[in-house]
Image: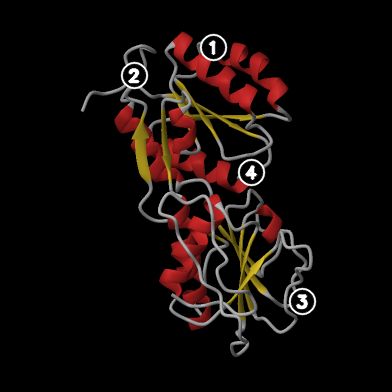
Amino acid sequence: MIKPAGLKKKSMLAGLASCILLVFSAGELPAADLAAVVSGKAGPYAAAYAAFSDALGMPHDFYDASAPDFAPPADILYAVAFGAKAAAVEYPPGTRLIYALAPVTARSRSWHEISMAPQPAEALAAYKKLQPGLKQLAVFWAAYPGEKYMEELRRAGEAAGIGIISAKLKSPDSFPERLRYLMGKMDAFWLMPDPVLITQSSLMMLANFSCSNGIPFYAPTYALVVHGATASFAPDFPEAGAAAARVIAALRRGDKLPPVTYPERTTLRVNEELRDKCRWPLARK
């Protein structure tokens, strides 16, 4: 694994089940034109960065945006940001920014998003297979992943025979009224990975509504399935890091890329523990 420059030895990325340990060189390495910036050294950022570093195969510098003295180097050409804090950094003019695990949409032609949401057609195909009677799907979101994603989702829904009900909310306080309105109009609902709407109380309310009414609740991550959602079709954090490495390689080759890249190997995971109790209309294996 590459040893990023400018950090002391024995820095540990905590919070990973696999106990990933990154050893940083105390000496200075030749300056790289690529900087990898994490919002913090633990959890999903560590997992995504570790996969990025393994897949990259080229020199780069590593930085922690949560460090009090952090400032991006002035001579980089590319930056890969993991997390919203890292994506919000003021990078030098002309820097090509690739960001992952950040719920923002690209604001510049030099920005490239690794989507936190799955490829729409693949997601609808997975949910349709799981729930054959799915005809109307309500989608809850506030700002992320944005109107362009919703347009793509509607087109995918037309091809799959699934009507998409765009339920854009301002805050989690809007959930009770919107759920009451959608009763009888939706066969399932899908929560986007939008932090504006994801709170402990809103997730508990959605899970209870889903189970009480037998209406599947499709979640943005598997972690929410563990806490009561019906299923999730979502990439894991290492997949986001690997996708960022592929984008860097493509940009260096001069390839033309769309503004958004979807991680590969997205997985459908189902809450088998609550399947029968909640009477969700799901297909049996």
Percent from the top left, x then y, of residue 24? 56, 74
Residue where numbered disc 2 is placed: 275
Q: Pick whichever of labels 3 and 1 is earlier in the sequence.
A: 3
Circle 3 sits in a helix, a strand or a loop, which is it? loop
Mark toward the viewer: 4 or 2? 2
**Residue occupying the point 32% across, 24% down:** 272
- Could you tell whether 77 is left or right of 268 in the image? right
Left or right: residue 284 compared with residue 165? left
Query: Front-most of 163 and 8?
Result: 8
Three-letter amino acid code at the position of disc 4? Tyr
Say which label, 4 or 2, has the lower sequence index. Answer: 4
Q: Residue furthest front?
A: 10
Residue 169, percent across and down? 69, 29
Give the Cα separation between the discs numbered 3 and 1: 49 Å
Q: Earlier in the sequence, mark 3 or mark 2?
A: 3
**Marked residue nearer the N-terminal end (1 or 2):** 1
Q: Bin the neighbour count of mark 3 within 10 Å (Cα to Cα): few under 14, some 14-19, many 20 and up.
A: few
For the residues labelled 3 and 1, say whether their Cβ atoms are less than 8 Å apart: no
Residue at 65%, 78% (x, y): give it: 6
Q: Which mark is residue 144?
A: 4
* Label 4: element kind: loop
Label whose residue precedes the other's in the sequence (4 or 3)? 3
Callout 1: SS: loop
Please determine whether, in this image, residue 29 is positioned above or below residue 122.
below
Q: Give the distance between the C-alpha atoms of the residues marked 3 and 2, in whole angstroms.
A: 51 Å
The disc labelled 1 sits on which kind of residue?
Answer: Met
Foreground mark, 1 or 2?
Answer: 2
